[in-house]
Image (spheres, grey):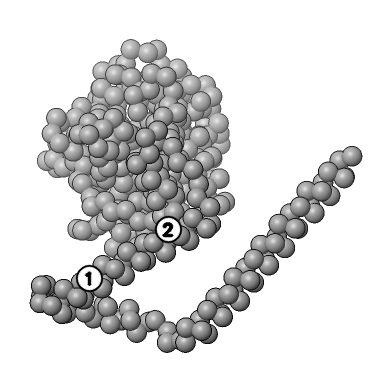
Amino acid sequence: MATPAVPASAAPTTPTPAMAAAPASAPAPAPAPVPVPAPTPAPSSSPDPAAAAAATAAPGQTQASLPAAAQTPAQSLASPALPGPFPGGRVVRLHPVILASIVDSYERRNEGAARVIGTLLGTVDKHSVEVTNCFSVPHNESEDEVAVDMEFAKNMYELHKKVSPNELILGWYATGHDITEHSVLIHEYYSREAPNPIHLTVDTSLQNGRMSIKAYISTLMGVPGRTMGVMFTPLTVKYAYYDTERIGVDLIMKTCFSPNRVIGLSSDLQQVAGSSARIQDALSTVLQYAEDVLSGKVSADNTVGRFLMSLVNQVPKIVPDDFETMLNSNINDLLMVTYLANLTQSQIALNEKLVNL
């Protein structure tokens, strides 16, 4: 596994919330493992990225080990740069699939692993960063060093680009409620893949009784010409979802009311009935509000009134008989299409059985 190992002791951190410092000039002591000679890079105009990534810590640090499997030069994860530094008020928008993927990776982690890390993918606009996808990256951590499988990360990103070419590398995530010394080293590696990468932390251990989710960016701090450190500045985290993701989230939310945390999928008719019941409840709430305003129990709100007026104007004026005729006609067309689709599926299945005889 092409895993550059970097001694974690070379990057001491300042024990303050969301802050970690990595010295930039003082060399670290020689690590305990016996160094393996660095591989001879292939003739190329650019340096060996695998060897360069081994120095994940600040300049002056020593390399602990580099397995022989890393002799094949690994190309850098090419990714368009984020547009300049994060301005004030930058927002990170997370999709539900990100949280589900992180939790799944944590549940499937190797035995003895304290946490999991991975790469965040998404898009960037003028006001926010939208994280739409991610994948986990194998790594090993100990008290003295940390090793990340960069070759695996490169291959996964190349595969993701074939499916979603618009997704960029935005940063990385880690499970846990705090930023550690190893986080500084890993963040330094991702800083070469995307300027100002995002560091997302997901507290899967539920330290405060809930899954805390925080996002950070790194900022250099210290005296120029002296030891420089890194400070992690928190960002605003918001949640976004597509319509398809909302359906899955609503289904997961229903398991909260199930004794065994298991719930089955609803049929199409049950979904229509549930939507109709929610619409009826909303209409009852609106009618009650209107009656309270007319009776003087509640003071009128101009904003709500304008919204209700806009809602009423969007309802088409149609004769009830014509509406019933149109609805029945559309239902008949839908049932016919469903019948033809099931008939076609049965014919295909029967044809496959006959071919296999």
Quarter of the image that includes the C terminus: top right
User: Who is closer to the viewer here, 336 or 67?
Assistant: 336
- Secondary element under disc 2, as helix, strand or loop, is helix
Residue on which the image places disc 2: 274
Residue on which the image places disc 1: 288
Q: In this orientation, does residue 181 appear?
A: yes
Residue type beneath disc 1? Gln
Vertical side of 268 occupied by 51: above or below: above
- Secondary element under disc 1, as helix, strand or loop, is helix
Q: Residue at x 27, y 38 (%)?
A: 211
Q: Residue at x 15, y 36 (%)?
A: 17
Q: In this orientation, does residue 25 appear?
A: no
Separation (CA) of disc 2 from disc 1: 21 Å
Residue 119 occupies which quadrant of the picture? top left
User: Who is closer to the viewer here, 226 or 253?
Assistant: 253
User: Who is closer to the viewer here, 354 or 84?
Assistant: 354
Q: Residue at x 15, y 80 (%)?
A: 294
Residue type beneath disc 2? Gly
